[in-house]
Image (cartoon, rainbow, N blue to C red):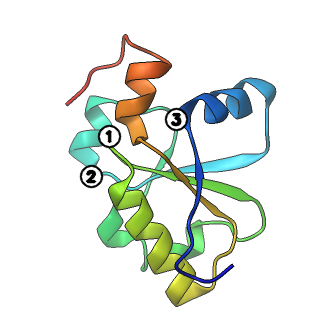
Amino acid sequence: MNSNEIKEIDVSELKKWKDSGEDFDLIDVREPNEYEIVQIGGKLIPLGEVSSRQSEISKDRKVVVMCRSGKRSATAIKELQTNFGYTNLINLNGGVLAWAEKIDPSLPRY
């Protein structure tokens, strides 16, 4: 895999992982004010802090990276793969918007 390729997961697959107790980390790269509006259990590391806090992101297990729609998380993954050699990152396609739409319609959208 070259460092430009990004693995993706959709929200229904992530829901299966959560429900089955799959071993993975969830990193949320949105801003703190967005995280306060709605979150689905990820660890908050805003996009602008990803490089300086990369030591908090595992290289040894599956890590799903998420944001509002999937764009910022893809940016974060590219940065981590290119600059720090990560090979275990997976982008949440559609982000928290897709989660609210398909998995939990009670969540606020913004």
- Per the model, the C-alpha gap separating discs 1 and 2 is 6 Å
Q: Is residue 11 visible?
A: yes
Q: What amino acid is found at the position of numbered circle 2 in the picture?
A: Glu
Q: Residue at x 69, y 78 (%)?
A: 1
Q: Is residue 48 above or below residue 101?
A: below
- Name the residue beneath numbered marker 1: 35
Marks 1 and 2 close (CB-CB < 8 Å) = yes
- Within 10 Å of the Cα at label 1, are there few (<14), some (14-19), or many (20+) other Cα atoms? some
Q: What amino acid is found at the position of numbered circle 1 in the picture?
A: Tyr
> Residue 65: horizontal and vertical position, in percent?
51, 54
> In this view of the protein, which residue sits in the foreground, 88 or 58?
88
- Name the residue beneath numbered marker 3: 41
Q: Is residue 104 above or below residue 82?
A: above
Marks 3 and 1 close (CB-CB < 8 Å) = no
> Residue 73: horizontal and vertical position, in percent?
42, 58
Label 1 sits on a secondary structure element that is helix
Specify the quadrant of the image occupied by residue 23. Answer: top right
- Within 10 Å of the Cα at label 2, are there few (<14), some (14-19), or many (20+) other Cα atoms? some
In the image, taking residue 50 as reference, residue 69 lies left or right, namely: left
Q: What amino acid is found at the position of numbered circle 3 in the picture?
A: Gly
Q: Quadrant of the C terminus?
A: top left
Q: Which of marks 1 and 3 precedes in the sequence?
A: 1
- Per the model, the C-alpha gap separating discs 3 and 1 is 10 Å
In the image, taking residue 69 as reference, residue 82 lies left or right, namely: right
> Residue 68: horizontal and vertical position, in percent?
32, 43
Q: Which of marks 3 and 2 precedes in the sequence?
A: 2
Q: Residue at x 79, y 38 (%)?
A: 22
Q: Is residue 6 above or below residue 82?
A: above
Specify the quadrant of the image occupied by residue 72. Answer: bottom left
Label 3 sits on a secondary structure element that is loop
- Per the model, the C-alpha gap separating discs 2 and 3 is 15 Å
- Name the residue beneath numbered marker 2: 31
